[in-house]
């Protein structure tokens, strides 16, 4: 059976049936996105690596709790965001080192970008500012913002991932955008 040809849900069902190779394929497909979500929420490379690893281990251990009626990726993102939020709560929202000093993380998240042109350098500076601004958001606001704007999930998928209502997602997203607008107001050109 060619596992690479199967969809996520079929792989998850195969894993539920005991096919460990299906888990390997799911990890291969999604470990980068899981890390990216964890990094955007935690704002720290080492924390993101820990969160991503723990989320993938939990996905393996808790695959029996996944239901085929909901997509596998939103379920995996829920595990990831819950793990990241738990870590932030445990750390008491301590301040992290500036994100732009986190060597290698930017290249891992944006491998297609190089630092050769002025426009690319500016884009990286803006990305670093956005990452720093994300740290002012509550964990729930940060999670909603990351899942919506970086992962492209629909509001209903985010609500499912966070186990809340679409209305709650909208409130968190609105508040996140307002806070980010204040934090990043100097990036807007005049007028």
Image: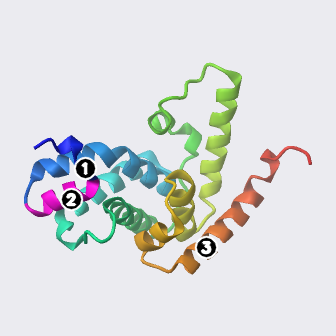
Please, what secondary structure does the residue beneath circle 3 have? helix
Where is residue 150 shown, x and y percent of the image? 53, 51
Residue shown at 63% from the left, 62% from the top:
136
**Does the magenta segment cover residue 75?**
no
**Rendered residue at 37%/52% (across/down):** 34
Q: Is residue 15 magenta?
A: yes
Q: Which residue is mark 1?
A: 26
**Is tag 3's residue or tag 1's residue first in the polypeptide sequence?**
1
Viewer-proximal residue, 153 or 106? Answer: 153
Q: Which residues are magenta?
A: 8-17
Point out the residue furthest to the top here. 116
Point out which mark residue 12 bears.
Answer: 2
Left or right of residue 177: residue 67: left
The foreground one among 155 and 31 is 155
Q: Residues within 10 Å of mark 3 (few under 14, many from 20)?
A: some
- Crowd class of label 2 (few under 14; some 14 to 19; many from 20; radius 10 Å): many
């Amino acid at each position: 059976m060619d596992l690479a040809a199967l969809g996520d849900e079929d792989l998850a069902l195969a894993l539920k049936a005991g096919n460990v190779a299906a888990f390997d394929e799911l990890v291969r497909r999604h470990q980068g996105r899981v890390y990216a979500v964890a990094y955007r929420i935690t704002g720290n490379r080492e924390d993101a690596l820990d969160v991503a690893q723990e989320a993938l281990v939990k996905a393996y251990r808790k695959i029996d709790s996944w239901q085929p009626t909901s997509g596998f990726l939103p379920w995996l993102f829920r595990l990831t965001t819950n793990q990241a939020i738990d870590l932030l709560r445990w750390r008491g929202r301590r301040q992290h080192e500036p994100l732009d000093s986190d060597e290698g993380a930017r290249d891992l998240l944006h491998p297609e970008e190089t630092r050769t042109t002025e426009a690319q350098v500016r884009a990286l500076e803006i990305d670093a500012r956005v990452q720093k601004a994300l740290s002012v958001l509550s964990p729930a606001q940060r999670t909603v913002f990351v899942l919506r704007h970086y992962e492209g999930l629909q509001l209903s998928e985010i609500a499912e991932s966070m186990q809340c209502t679409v209305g709650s997602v909208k409130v968190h997203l609105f508040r996140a955008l307002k806070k980010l607008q204040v934090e990043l107001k100097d990036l807007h050109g005049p007028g």
